[in-house]
Amino acid sequence: MKKLFTLFLCIALWVVPRQPQAWGFFGHRLINRLAVFTLPPEMIGFYKANITYLTDNATRPDQRRSVVPGEAARHFIDADVYGPNALSQLPRSYADAVAEHGEDSLLRHGIVPWQVTRMKYQLTEAFRVHDTDRILHLSADLGHYVADACVPLHTTRNYNGQLSGQRGIHGLWESRLPELLSNNYDFFTGPAPYLDNPTKTIWQAVARSHAAVDSVLCFEEELTASFPEDRKFGFEERNNQTVRTYSRDFSRAYHARLHGQVERQMRRAMQLVGAIWYTCWVDAGQPDLDIMPKTLSEEEKQRLKAEETQLQNAPHTASTGHDE
């Protein structure tokens, strides 16, 4: 099984576009793609038939961030705003959280765990009514939000080091390191498990991510003290442009200080995405996916084209939080 997965991994790493965008675009696409291979036989045929869609659309929520009001808040939660024990005390029900903190405050400081829970029920219903278009749309989006919950800097108001003089660390951790080093990561997770309590699981994932924030920031600060500016940063050619970025030496040294943290969080994200897809299918009664349409309807294809045009042409709106 592990040898078979390794073969799939090699193929996936080869075909996923390596775009240096905000995980980054590369990371989100890889996570959605490899999550497919954690699924049981009853699901994997349907998901593999649509693996290109799930890969390409893994980044659509990021494309909506500055266009769709309220979208940005779905990607993060500033846990430290609510106090040191926030992640064990915040209401798991979004309605209860609104009653306790007010919706404006929640949207300002992020709602990612509530968003994942909400979409879990939506995907379950899509499976129950055999709606292929909605299953695929929700699966792709849900994969994105689950992956975001596994990024430590998506759980703190100091999300880009802007409060500690480390501006740019967000892209270093979630984009630069995977782009440079993920070819050597071990992404074998085993089969996706059924989640008895998906809400509890996503909050645990956020708590695990938040527990890593101190090391993400402290290790970068310590390393910076030993790297002169001209060794910490360098210039590379990207898309016919010369851009300033973290040097390969600094990136590799930072990666070593983190002791495989980025690899572990990517692996957790892949398994958790697969686990939530699987749990939704089971909770919907395990519908036979082999008798359902395996491709998007023409109506959904047209909707996607219209949305793409809208995203390209719509004026950008101010994002609420984590806008760098």
Image (spheres, grey):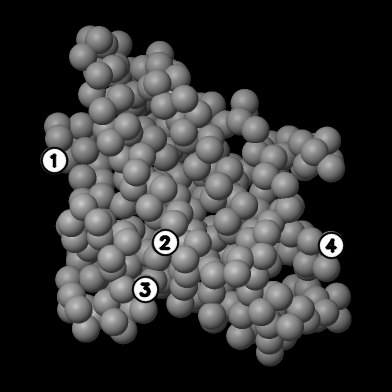
**Of the numbered discs in the image, which one, if any, rests on residue 203?**
2
Q: Residue at x 65, y 39 (%)?
A: 187
First along the sequence among labels 2 and 4? 4
Q: Which residue is mark 4?
A: 41
Q: Is 322 left or right of 300, judged from the image as shown?
A: left
**Could you classify mark 3 by the number of other residues whose Cα lies within 10 Å: few (under 14), some (14-19), or many (20 or more)?**
some
Q: Which residue is mark 3?
A: 92
Q: Residue at x 63, y 74 (%)?
A: 280
Quadrant placement of the N terminus: top right
Do callouts 3 and 4 mark residues in contact (Cβ within 8 Å)?
no
**Of the numbered discs in the image, which one, if any, rests on residue 163?**
1
Considering the numbered disc 4 on the image, is that residue within a helix, a strand or a loop? helix
Give x and y (percent) for residue 170.
32, 40
Identified by mark 3, the residue type is Arg
First along the sequence among labels 1 and 4? 4
Instruction: Calculate the distance from the C-alpha at mark 1 to the C-alpha at mark 3.
Output: 28 Å
Identified by mark 1, the residue type is Leu
First along the sequence among labels 3 and 4? 4
